[in-house]
Image: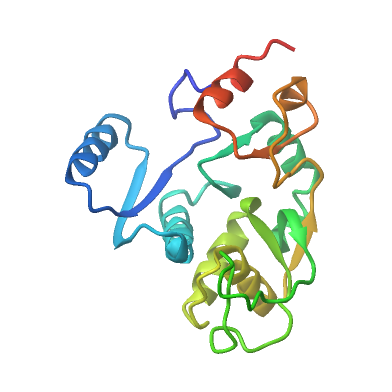
């Protein structure tokens, strides 16, 4: 996959958006969408606390319009993704991913009760002492089979604003598992040839740094 060849290869991408209040930006988005046809937008406020809505929008769309796809990856806009590394990892874990989500996965975690935290969850929102596990929303991959099942089961679970936790709750309800895959990072990794080799994701990467990483000659 190359950023210069357009969205026409065996690995396809879509950008996910909610509603925005900036009218000029909305016009620009519609212009870009008409040109590249790679933007999904629905009528909910685009905010951190609505990431669950955004991800379920993506899972529904992928299940409907990408039925022949074998795998689906969800990632964030400040993440570099080494596509070749991702494909190697998917091929290596293709069987387990039929009943699992893979990435930088945490098998047990406690809700954060600090109201000042970005990841705050009150006891009313989540009354239990532990989350059942999750893969970091910075980037995770699963099969189309699991994608469909997660979207379907999501309709029957209470809404939870932390998207990766919500997906984890769906996975737990389905009786599926979490798979730790080496190379998925939730931290920034300095630009180097590791971007073409050992890493799959790097977090907090600016557009300029992404271009530098794509242009590496290693």
Q: How many marks?
A: 0
Residue drawn 60% across the image and 63% down it = 164
Instruction: Residue 84 in the image: state x and y as whole percent.
Output: 69, 29
Residue drawn 80% across the image and 31% down it = 198
Q: Nearer the viewer, residue 84 or 144?
A: 84
**Image quarter hosting the C terminus:** top right
Horizontal arrangement in the rendering, residue 112 relative to residue 198 (left or right): left
**Image quarter hosting the N terminus:** top right
Residue drawn 61% across the image and 73% down it = 170
Residue extending furthest toward the front = 116
Horizontal arrangement in the rendering, residue 54 relative to residue 36 (left or right): right
Horizontal arrangement in the rendering, residue 73 relative to residue 176 (left or right): left
Instruction: Residue 95 in the image: state x and y as whole percent.
Output: 77, 53
**Occupied quadrant, residue 216:** top right
Instruction: Residue 184 in the image: state x and y as whole percent.
Output: 74, 44
Q: Nearer the viewer, residue 109 or 36?
A: 109
Colour pattern of the rendering: rainbow
Q: Nearer the viewer, residue 39 or 129?
A: 129
Residue drawn 35% across the image and 48% down it = 40
Q: Is residue 4 visible?
A: yes
Instruction: Residue 105 in the image: state x and y as whole percent.
Output: 75, 58
**Occupied quadrant, residue 163:** bottom right
Q: Is residue 1 visible?
A: no
């Amino acid at each position: 996959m190359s950023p210069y060849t357009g969205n026409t290869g065996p690995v396809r991408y879509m950008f996910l958006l909610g509603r925005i209040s900036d009218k000029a930006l909305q016009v620009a988005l519609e212009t870009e969408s008409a040109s590249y046809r790679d933007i999904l937008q629905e009528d909910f406020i685009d905010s951190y606390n609505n990431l669950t809505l955004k991800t379920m929008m993506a899972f529904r769309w992928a299940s409907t319009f990408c039925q022949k796809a074998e795998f689906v990856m969800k990632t964030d806009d400040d993440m570099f993704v080494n596509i070749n590394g991702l494909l190697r990892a998917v091929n290596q874990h293709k069987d387990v991913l039929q009943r699992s989500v893979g990435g930088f996965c945490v098998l047990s975690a406690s809700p954060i009760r600090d109201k000042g935290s970005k990841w705050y969850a009150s006891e009313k929102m989540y009354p239990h002492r532990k989350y059942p596990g999750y893969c970091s929303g910075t980037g995770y991959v699963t099969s189309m089979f699991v994608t469909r099942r997660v979207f379907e089961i999501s309709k029957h679970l209470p809404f939870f604003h932390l998207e990766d936790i919500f997906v984890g709750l769906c996975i737990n309800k389905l009786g599926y598992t979490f798979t730790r895959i080496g190379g998925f990072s939730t931290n920034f990794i300095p630009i180097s040839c590791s971007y073409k080799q050992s890493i799959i994701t790097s977090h907090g990467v600016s557009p300029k740094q992404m271009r530098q990483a794509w242009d590496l000659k290693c």
